[in-house]
Image (cartoon, rainbow, N blue to C red):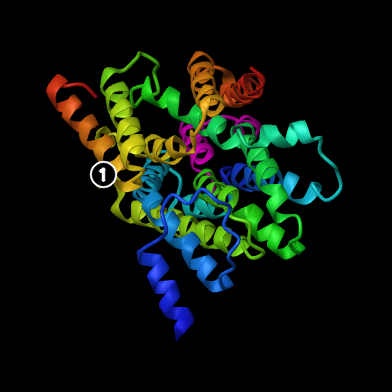
Amino acid sequence: MYELSIIITQLFWPEKGYTVMNRVESSSFSEFLFGFRDELPILVGVIPFGLIFAILAQQANISAVEAQAMSLIVFAGSSQFMLVQLAGINAPIPVMVVTGFIINLRHLLYSASIAPYTRKLSYPWKLILSYLLTDEAYAVTIAYFQKNNKSNMHWYYLGAGLALWGSWQLSTWFGLLLGAQIPSNWSLDFSLALTFIALVVPMIKDRPSLFVALSAGFVAIITANFPYKLGLLIAALAGILVGLWSEKN
Amino acid sequence: MTSIWYPIIFVGILTFLTRLSFIVLSDMIKLHPRVRSAFRYIPIAVLSAIIFPELVQNHDAQILFYFPRIFAGLFAILIAWRTRNIILTITGGMLVLYIMQYLFILR
């Protein structure tokens, strides 16, 4: 009962702005709930994106079963968007596979940055957490991992990952049900860029990190028309190099 | 079984292996400390590289320094910086985008 009251208190009145590394252990269940809770605001931006995906899939003559399977198996928004667009123009299968794969290469960087925290986990845990490694779950989780040092932090990741997973599956499903009742000129796709803004701005705490953001963004605009969205990777690597360089100076 | 199943399954497998890569391999390889310190810039670098092109494109993904999105994006950055509130940032940014689109009859 005491444990439950602490969970509820922390859920509704989370401590804000702690700068010291937090090592106070809480139960695995409350870690899970914290992760789930911290992911919820992100869903405001993700759900519209899932709805649009479903509608684009229908417009490309992809069946409901296929669209839902794509959300379950690929489980990566931007490459799913590209796949339905390519399906709409009857692109060859190898082109679709290569394009979808290269767009998702940024997950290599996410995997590298999350790996130090999952080192001690069992293989089933590593498989499940890998499946749940999306832009949005990663961004929320890495911000938490960098501020905390607990032995059961992977439960936080699981909570954030499952919240995002559930909302992506459900918003795909609702989009398939609603169909074309949502017009594309509502600019709902912009909500995802806004979500990432909300996630990245609090991470910028010093001069090097500001330089990373500005240089990665600048290079990304210049390289935006590169094939296979390769500009994204080039821009991210450029940003990281600028960050390392500005640390020295 | 139509052809869309092949991309779904292959991209799914390749994406999963990409996500799995370092999480499983880091047991076997030791990374240089300098590479490690570069890791802390990964979230900012990748997310910024996703955000910035979105701010200068219209909804057909044409780069044309699309005024309403730049303005809404800058406003959202301001809200995020001052409040650190995710929902306020998203709704505020969308609201400004809609106002700009309405005022300038653009899409």
Q: Pinpoint residue B35: horizontal percent, then vertical percent.
A: 75, 32
A182 relative to A103 in the view: left or right? left
Magenta-drawn segment: A75-99
| Camera-side residue of A209 and A173 | A209
| Camera-side residue of A7 and B101 | A7
Quarter occupied by residue B29: top right
Quarter occupied by residue B58: top left
- Is A215 covered by the magenta stretch? no
The answer to whether one can see residue A102 in this image is yes
- Badge 1 marks a residue whose secondary structure is loop
Residue at 25%, 38% in the rendered image: B92
Residue at 49%, 21% in the rendered image: A214
Quadrant assignment for the C terminus of chain B? top left
Residue at 50%, 60% in the rendered image: A35
Name which residue type carries label 1.
Answer: Ile
Q: Which residue is mark 1?
A: A182
Q: Pinpoint residue B4: horizontal percent, then vertical percent.
A: 56, 43
Please determine whether, in this image, residue A228 is positioned above or below residue A105. above
Label 1 marks which chain's residue?
Answer: A
B92 relative to A194 in the view: left or right? left
Please determine whether, in this image, residue B34 is positioned above or below residue B9. above
Q: Pinpoint residue A79: horizontal percent, then vertical percent.
A: 53, 37
Q: Main secondary structure of the magenta part?
A: helix
